[in-house]
Amino acid sequence: MHIEILVPSPGESITRVQIAKWLAVDGETISKDQEIVEIDSDKASFPIAAPEGGTLKIMVPEGETVAVGSVIATIEPAPDSGKNPEKGQLPPVVVPEMKDNPAVKDPHPADQTPGKNHIPESFNASPLAKKIIQDHDLSPADIVAVYPGKKITRKYIEAFIRKRKTTSEPVTTGISRESDRKKLSTLRIKLAERLVSVKNQTAMLTTFNEVNMEPILKIKEQYTAEFKEHHGVGIGLMSFFTKAVTTALTEFPLVNSQIDGDELVTPRYVDIGIAVSAPKGLVVPVIRNAESMSLPEIEQKIKELAGKARENKITLDDMKGGTFTITNGGVFGSLMSTPIINPPQSAILGMHKIQERPVARDGKVIIAPMMYIALSYDHRVIDGRESVGFLVKVKELLETPELLLTGGIDPIRLLLDL
């Protein structure tokens, strides 16, 4: 009796998902707990593992959208007919004696040589790798020459095919008029819907400022090695911005608010969403209660979430909630942009590329590493005083990092109890 592979529910309100990628091929013998398919929902991607071993029968091809609970494949368990039910032992294999028989032809006569994709018994490869070799008419000898001493798996075969394609394709000088067409992922479709709804349903404005990053860059240069040795992570810019945002939000709590029906909700905590460009689209994992975390704790959490996003292992729980978002277009070279609010939040901070520019200081022109920062906000919730004041406060905290130790209060004023 075969086992059905059903699409599990990725979360509330999600009724349809997309078959992103089959990790095994139709007819392959798979093992228990082996990941066989990747599923895309409108919020995250996740794999499905085989509940039992056996032969896989794929029923829904890649790119198709199906309902939650649908059958997308079946597994035919391996037969146990040769097993002794009393002792649990396999009966001995009897090999019949071969005799000369003119009626039986030699399957490999001496005058016939195997084809180039003939796989010898000594070829150390997985069953899936062997099947791909046969399907693509590859030479096992060529593969072994590239990966000597390795057990050949699908990963090696796919790399071999890519390498052969890039080195063997002829260079053409003609002008192409061809187009590539593929289905949008469910995640990309949902992202598009959300971005359009933000533009249509919020009164979004953006205010700008610039930050002299010299103090933070000096901290990174002086303390990175010691910091990494002590905490296991390097010093990044995002942790400083997260700490500055959580501090500034205590003074401007409206920036941390959101509209819920006819009510304004202002959390007494700060859950910071960090926008990350993952292989399948933009995701925003959340650092919860960031206001209570130290800079090393923030740095460690950012590293954990960013790693999960890059490996497509981010979960729905990792992305739930969020009261404020930070996005860094500077990693791609962006000098200035207007980030789009992540609903139902009311504001998002955009970081950008650090660039040396001439600036005035004490009546003189100097060269300093400057960064433009942008705050996009919903004007229905946040007025100009709060938006501009918040951004100025973030600038002040970044240019004077020691203020982050005192909650943004001048240390001299603390000393003087003012």
Image (cartoon, rainbow, N blue to C red):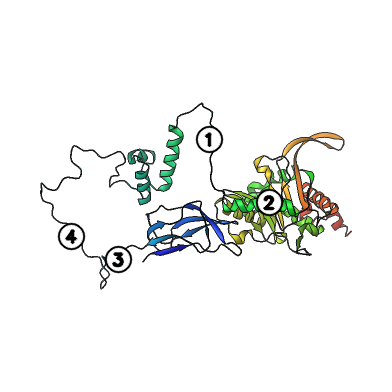
Secondary structure under tag 1 reads loop
**What numbered label is drawn on residue 178?**
1
Q: Nearer the viewer, residue 208 or 358?
A: 208
Q: Along the polypeptide, which appears first: circle 1 or circle 2? A: 1
Residue at disc 4, secondary structure: loop
Q: Amino acid at mark 2?
A: Leu
Q: Is residue 347 above or below residue 337?
A: below
Q: Quadrant of the N terminus?
A: bottom left
Q: Nearer the viewer, mark 4 or mark 2?
A: 2
Residue at coordinates 14% horizontally, 48% vertically from top-left? Answer: 104
- Image location of residue 88, percent across then percent down: 27, 70
Q: Disc 2 and disc 3: Cα gap in Å?
A: 54 Å
**Residue contact at pointers 1 and 2, CB within 8 angstroms:** no
Lower sequence index among marks 2 and 3 = 3
Mark 3 to mark 1 CA distance (whole Å) = 52 Å
Q: How many neighbours does mark 4 have within 10 angstroms: few (below 14), some (14-19), or many (20 or more)? A: few
Mark 3 to mark 4: distance in Å? 18 Å
Viewer-closest of 316 and 418 = 316
Quarter holding residue 330: top right
Report the number of numbered marks.
Answer: 4
Q: CA distance from mark 4 to mark 1?
A: 60 Å
Amino acid type, callout 3: Asp
Q: Earlier in the sequence, mark 3 or mark 4?
A: 3
Q: CA distance from mark 1 to mark 2?
A: 30 Å
Residue wearing tag 4: 94
Q: Position of residue 15 (x, y in %)?
A: 57, 62
